[in-house]
Image (spheres, grey):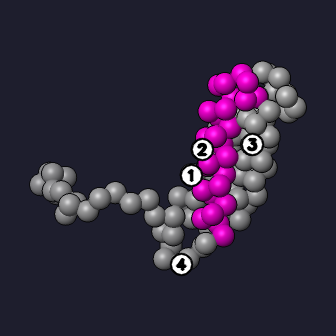
Amino acid sequence: MTRASRSTGGRPFRLRLNSDGRRHPVENVLSIVTLACGLVALVCAVIPGAHALAAWLGVVGFVGGFYSQYVSATTAERSLNIVGIVASFVGVALGIYHGGFFP
């Protein structure tokens, strides 16, 4: 039980996308862009006047997320991809509900 109560040495939490020790710059960028598109689409989907932006960003995040998931190399990248894909899906669905792809 003494091991469980030890601190981590004061190191701050860092999200490491390259957990396998190799660099994956393209895959990392794709994962982050997928997440960003999904989150922006989700936020815009809540605003009925921004339905077109939500729909288009949702589609870009959804399709790009599937490609990013296909080429991803680490579990951290895949986790970001799934969060981005789900947020993009919800964003595009609500964007279509509020008025579709065109203003």
Instruction: Say what secondary structure mark 1 lies in.
Output: helix
In this rendering, position of residue 101 left or right of residue 71: right
The amino acid at mark 2 is: Val
Residue reaching furthest to the left: 2
Q: Are marks 2 and 4 in contact (CB under 8 Å)?
A: no
Magenta range: 26-51
Instruction: Estimate the x, y position of residue 63 in percent, counting from the top left.
Output: 79, 49
Q: Which residue lies at the image location 77% right of the left edge and 48% below the top edge?
A: 60
Q: Are marks 4 and 3 in contact (CB under 8 Å)?
A: no
Q: Are marks 1 and 2 in contact (CB under 8 Å)?
A: yes
In the drawing, what numbered circle is on residue 79?
Answer: 1
Q: Which residue lies at the image location 80% right of the left edge and 40% below the top edge?
A: 56
In the drawing, what numbered circle is on residue 22?
Answer: 4
The amino acid at mark 4 is: Arg
Mark 2, residue position:
83
Instruction: Estimate the x, y position of residue 31 in percent, counting from the top left.
Output: 63, 57
Marks 4 and 3, how far apart in space? 30 Å
